[in-house]
Amino acid sequence: MRAYTSYEPLTEYVLRCADNTLVLGHRISEWCGHGPILEQDIALTNMALDLLGQSRMYLKYAAELLGHEETEDSVAFLRDAMQFRNSLLVEQPNGDFAHTIVRSLIFDSFHYFFSEQLIRSKDQQLADIAAKSLKEITYHRKFSSEWSIRLGDGTEESNRRMQTAIDDLWRYKGELLTPDEIDNEMKEKGIGVDLNLIAPSVDNYLSQVLSRANLQLPQDEFMQKGGKQGLHSEHLGYILAELQFMQRAYPGLNW
């Protein structure tokens, strides 16, 4: 893998999609064997696999755009943290079950409306990936929404934990919906999603779920950012140390 520090705009855009699903899929996979009950353990593992499958489609496309004999594996396993373009939200630790659910709720709410619009992209490969993924994404949003309501409107303890998770993670929502130069360029070319267009739908959906869950929207308007430009928290380094270990330790390993 070449030591890229920046990419062509379309490649940047595709990598953002790929890295969001890859990193979140890895995070959720950490619950395998540790879920609160067997049914949810299996559900979380299946959702991690869904996200990995979506990421593979984006990674394969990114490898084609990069050229130089890149593959989906080299793009996933041989980039350093600063070359990743995922949002800061998806790399946040699992924490307790409430934190995992809230992290998924925020991302799933964004991902649903994002993919719904990406189906209309002039880039046929992006449109096809979004179309193939939307059914899975719809289920993911349903899962995180129902659990948010169940826990928020449950016991005093479950409500407290959910509110704590909302207060901790809400600051990462803004990055998903705030366009930068790449987002605007892709939108103007009819390739990418208009984030300003979907933001009200995402916010409205989240507000409805949190209201039903008896949870309060945080009042602090400060939002973290930087992940889309390759500026990450310390958490991503630990994720990549585990995710990339085999390929780094045994370069070119084949099964």
Image (spheres, grey):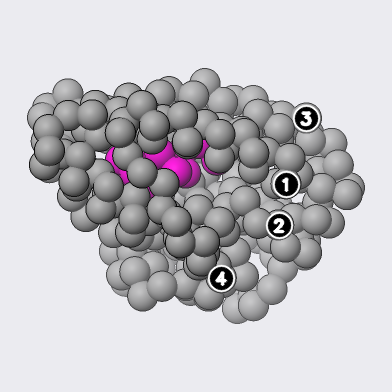
Mark 2 or 1: the one toward you: 1
Q: Earlier in the sequence, mark 1 or mark 4?
A: 1
3D distance between C-alphas at marks 2 and 1: 7 Å
Q: Residues within 10 Å of mark 3 (few under 14, many from 20)?
A: some
Compared across the picture, whether 57 is left or right of 125 comes to: left
Q: Earlier in the sequence, mark 2 or mark 1?
A: 2
What residue lies at 52% left-to-right and 31% top-to-bottom?
205
Q: Does dot 4 land on a helix, a strand or a loop?
A: loop
Badge count: 4
Mark 3 or 1: the one toward you: 1
Q: Earlier in the sequence, mark 4 or mark 3?
A: 3
Q: Residue 172 at what x, y percent from top left?
A: 47, 59
List the residue tagged with mark 4. 226
Q: Is residue 206 above or below residue 100?
A: above
Residue 120's tag is 3
List the residue tagged with mark 2. 179
Residue 167's tag is none
3D distance between C-alphas at marks 1 and 4: 18 Å
Is residue 114 part of the magenta span, yes or no? no
Q: Earlier in the sequence, mark 3 or mark 1?
A: 3
Q: Residue 84 at what x, y percent from top left?
A: 53, 66
What residue lies at 55% left-to-right and 67% top-to-bottom?
225
3D distance between C-alphas at marks 4 and 3: 27 Å
Span of residues in magenta: 101-110
Q: Is residue 70 above or below residue 44?
A: below
Compared across the picture, whether 73 is left or right of 118 comes to: left
Q: Residues within 10 Å of mark 1 (few under 14, many from 20)?
A: few
Q: Earlier in the sequence, mark 4 or mark 2?
A: 2
Tell me the amino acid under the disc marked 2. Pro
Compared across the picture, whether 113 is left or right of 244 comes to: right
